[in-house]
Image (tube, rainbow, N blue to C red):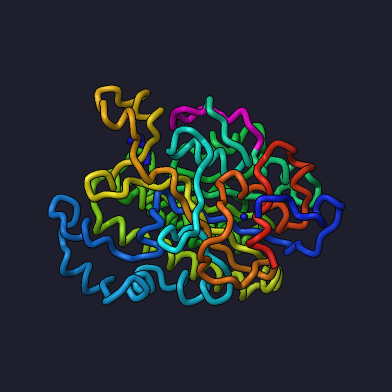
Amino acid sequence: MKKTLSILVLTTLLAGANSYGADNLVLVTIDGLRWQEVFGGTDPSILQDGKLTHAPDLLQEKFGGDNAEEKRRKLMPFLWHTVARQGILFGNRDKGSQMAVTNPWWFSYPGYNEILTGKADPKIDSNDALPNRNVTFLEWLNRNADYRGRVAAFGSWDVFPAIINRKRSGVYVNAGFESADWAQPSPRTQLLNELQQETPTPWDTVRFDAYTYDLAREYLLRNKPRVLYIALGETDDFAHDREYDQYLGAAHRADRFIANLWQQLQSMDQYRGNTDLIITVDHGRGRTAQLWPHHGSPQAMRKNHPEEKQLAQSGIAGSDEIWLAALGPDIRAGGEISGGPMLYQNQVAATALALLGEKPGDFATDIGPVMEVLLK
């Protein structure tokens, strides 16, 4: 991870009232998962690269198909069987739907800050675990008596306590290899605590997404938050490791986790028909097989890899290209969008707040506007 929702605010929001407002919101991010795989399935150029794909025949059997539609349904079945039918998806550039980051760096901490605060901060120029000086919409909600103690975040990357500024915000954050520490944990939670400490992992700063998801689900069952953020990370790290097989496997698992989460939400009185779901990413990655493992803007390349003269001029093309999917009672059943307005990462925070029935302008006046095209 570390190697390195129209454009105007809703008139009703400006007027101080709106018809939106499911009581609960779930935000899921899948680190560095490209729109190309989400909308097109397996990439033939990477599949055929022996340095990046180790079992192409197995991947072809599991995720292959005669066209993009068939391949993507196999890779992310919940996204394409449920979200695409009942909700909405943006970001298929092959169909003229575009979404991009606005921060100048095109990597993780700047992207997560932009998602959660509604604006880019050019001064966040590294992935170092420095406490975020900016206030996230999670923190702002947690200051409100209606949400206090009912906002939580779970992340695979150990930098999320800093991104959300856990100490200042008071938001419950569990990330990296941290054990669940809430009161009266279930036997399953206690087992997860033990297992994640005993399971070998390829990375020092990122745990497997299964632990992040399962702990988040246990917290949901025990504490019933109104706002839950789950940040999955394996896709990015396997890509940096040049493991396309594992990257696709991580994307498939992420889809399965989200499917399981949605099923769980619909089984609980608090959440059934009363919860909106947003799924998005912090950044894109290179468009070609050669550059797929990487991401970063020209500015980031000049800062971190000055020896790469060509990349210092162009950056990793495609790194700023992102996507978003949403599902819930306040979400328009638009399916896969073709064309439409250009959307930006800095619009996620305002959209999340609007879905909760909050006025984004009360949070901040200098953030990206609500994605009106996403709402019913």
Q: Residue furthest left?
A: 50
Residue 306 placement: quadrant: top left
Q: Position of residue 295 (x, y in %)?
A: 35, 40
Q: Quadrant of the N terminus?
A: top left
Q: Is residue 179 above or below residue 66?
A: above
Residue 302 placement: quadrant: top left
Q: Is residue 361 visible?
A: yes
The residue depicted at 75 percent of the width and 41 percent of the height is 363
* Closer to us: 113 or 234: 113
The residue depicted at 41 percent of the width and 52 percent of the height is 194
Q: What is the span of residues highlighted in magenta in the rendered image?
A: 124-135
Q: Position of residue 347 (x, y in %)?
A: 62, 48
Q: Position of residue 122 (x, y in %)?
A: 53, 28
The residue depicted at 64 percent of the width and 47 percent of the height is 349
Q: Is residue 202 visible?
A: no
Residue 251 placement: quadrant: bottom left
Q: Quadrant of the C terminus?
A: bottom right
* Prevailing secondary structure of the magenta residues: loop
* Closer to us: 65 or 132: 65
Q: Is residue 315 above or below residue 44?
A: above
* Closer to us: 185 or 98: 98
Q: Position of residue 254 (x, y in %)?
A: 42, 61
Instruction: Indicate yes or no whether the magenta region holds residue 126.
Output: yes
